[in-house]
Image: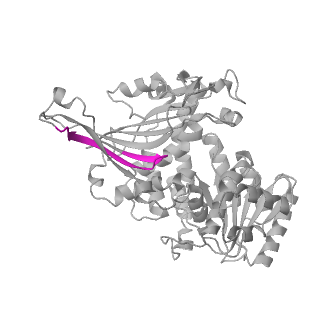
């Protein structure tokens, strides 16, 4: 893709800024215009676990317009009443003392059919026309693709076939929310992009990564750009290296068959890790809006050095969990999970070293690790600072002193920790590392907003800031592509680690080769 094409696409992507520039985006209460939310895959797991509960909470908080309807679409042969039962079951544990959600759910509709059949979309168009007239919706649409990825293009084409992909009037909007994964490799990602753009403009497409909806991910921006004490040291002169950790104690659970087609590299590194890394390392944006922030994220991703396939054996570790023990309970290895091949070579753990070739980060290694069935569930970014050039109290006086570290904990204990040296009380001048901790729960005890609630509301408002632009997706895939290809060639060899451990010994060797060590989970 040429620079001219990329630039024009980026501008097109952010034209929607004009749609919401006059809206109260920074207020605590934002309310979209009247709209119909169409959920494709409405009877599936994602809709029941995430989407419907999020919409329910938005309604109860008064953040939905009175003129709002959900239209479910799926292959399940149920009617409107059957869909309402699914909605009620998915939201039964959410308190609704004033019956707000109950009133909304009475008007919800459902369309049953095959996405490959145009008749399904003809029927959907008819239902949307009916709710427009009945509930004063006015023609505004948000389509949410909560289906399996191979149906994304099919649904987009189906909507186009009945002219549901374009606004009917100038004051209407039509938006498409797309769940990850955005393709299975670089080529399929580009093909999906072409298919979606055949039916929708870039500024209509909202690619959702739920990590971007987490308050602590967004707080990276606040930490960096609202505090003068951090920005001067946020560079290669003071930072020795950066670590990004996405550790899970759970295994693949009931998703074994899916995970066999994905693996840790595609499931976590290509999306979540690249998003967090770009926010952490990017340059200050010229403006705190979608255009400014997304432009800088893309610039950062383009600066990440892309190693050749042959170099990956020295930069990457891939591994798979075996049997072990989690919190005192024995668990099986990955190859014994339901839906997993007994000879599977799918990685459940990846560790890699990256470099960013720009003025700010030249020469600073970025260490990334992610894995399942590890000793602890934690997602964090750690900025490890360089040691002082000279310690007057060296030797045993400072043997408990570690490098200063600024850690941003994204989950589960959201907060920020700063580790630094302090004198131990007593007559001797001994120093050791201590921590200052900031906890989100303690500082902001009020109920925090779920990531899906924030992102769904942003999509309905037309705010693209926390969504992934097409050039971001492509660049993230370009970084991951050589690693993915090396895995397909069986390099590096698949290592093993016991469940409940901190990962394979090979990951320790990767970072220890440069005299560094992973932050303790």
Q: Is residue 151 magenta?
A: no
> Which x, y percent locates residue 242?
37, 40
Magenta stretch, residue numbers: 407-425
Q: In this view, does 362 lie above or below 230?
A: above
Q: Residue at x 70, y 25 (%)?
A: 341
In the picture provided, is 395 more to the left or to the right than 96? left
> Which x, y percent locates residue 313?
48, 24
Instruction: Tell me how the rendering is colored.
Output: one colour
Image quadrant of residue 141?
Answer: bottom right
Question: Closer to the camera, 453 or 369?
Answer: 453
Image quadrant of residue 187?
Answer: top right
> Which x, y percent locates residue 503?
49, 27
Question: Closer to the camera, 56 or 511?
Answer: 56
Q: Which residue is drawn at 62% across and 39% down?
A: 185
Q: Is residue 147 above or below residue 423?
A: below
Image quadrant of residue 403?
Answer: top left
In the picture provided, is 298 more to the left or to the right than 343? left
């Amino acid at each position: 893709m040429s620079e001219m094409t990329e630039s024009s696409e980026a501008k097109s992507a952010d034209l929607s800024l004009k749609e919401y520039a006059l809206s109260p985006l920074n207020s605590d209460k934002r309310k979209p215009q009247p709209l119909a939310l169409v959920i494709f895959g409405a009877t599936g797991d994602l809709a029941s676990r995430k989407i419907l509960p999020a919409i329910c909470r938005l309604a109860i908080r008064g953040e939905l317009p009175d003129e709002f309807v959900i239209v479910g679409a799926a292959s399940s042969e149920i009617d409107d009443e059957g869909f309402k039962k699914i909605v009620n079951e998915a939201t039964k544990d959410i308190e609704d003392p004033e019956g707000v959600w109950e009133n909304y759910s009475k008007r919800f509709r459902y369309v049953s059919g095959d996405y490959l059949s145009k008749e399904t979309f003809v029927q959907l168009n008819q239902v949307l026309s009916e709710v427009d007239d009945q509930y004063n919706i006015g023609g505004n649409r948000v389509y949410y693709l909560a289906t399996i990825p191979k149906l994304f293009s099919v649904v987009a084409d189906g909507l186009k076939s009945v002219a549901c992909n374009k606004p009917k009037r100038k004051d209407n909007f039509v938006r498409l929310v797309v769940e990850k994964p955005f393709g299975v490799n670089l080529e399929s990602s580009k093909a999906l992009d072409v298919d979606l753009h055949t039916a929708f403009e870039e500024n209509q497409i909202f690619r959702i990564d739920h990590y971007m909806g987490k308050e602590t991910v967004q707080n990276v921006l606040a930490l960096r750009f609202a505090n003068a004490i951090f920005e001067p040291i946020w560079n290669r002169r003071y930072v020795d290296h950066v670590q990004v950790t996405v550790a899970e104690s759970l295994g693949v659970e009931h998703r074994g068959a899916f995970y066999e087609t994905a693996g840790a590299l595609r499931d976590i590194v290509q999306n979540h890790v690249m998003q967090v890394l770009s926010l952490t390392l990017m340059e200050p944006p010229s403006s705190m809006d979608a255009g400014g922030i997304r432009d800088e994220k893309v610039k950062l991703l383009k600066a990440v050095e892309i190693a050749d396939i042959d170099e990956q054996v020295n930069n990457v570790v891939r591994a798979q969990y075996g049997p072990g023990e989690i919190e005192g309970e024995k668990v099986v290895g990955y190859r014994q999970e339901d839906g997993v091949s007994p000879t599977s070579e799918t990685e459940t753990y990846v560790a890699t070293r990256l470099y960013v070739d720009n003025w700010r980060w030249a020469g600073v290694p970025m260490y990334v690790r992610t894995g399942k069935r590890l000793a602890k569930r934690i997602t964090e970014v750690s900025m490890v600072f360089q040691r002082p050039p000279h310690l007057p109290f060296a030797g045993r006086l400072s043997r408990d002193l570690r490098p200063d570290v600024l850690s941003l904990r994204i989950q589960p204990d959201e907060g920020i920790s700063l580790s630094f040296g302090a004198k131990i009380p007593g007559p001797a001048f001994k120093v050791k590392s201590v921590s200052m901790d900031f906890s989100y729960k303690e500082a902001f005890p009020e109920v925090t907003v779920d990531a899906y609630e924030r992102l769904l509301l942003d999509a309905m408002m037309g705010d693209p800031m926390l969504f992934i632009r097409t050039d971001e997706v492509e660049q993230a895939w370009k970084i991951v592509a050589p690693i993915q290809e090396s895995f397909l060639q069986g390099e590096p060899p698949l290592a093993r680690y016991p469940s409940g451990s901190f990962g394979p010994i090979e990951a320790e060797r990767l970072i220890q080769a440069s005299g560094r060590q992973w932050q303790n989970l």
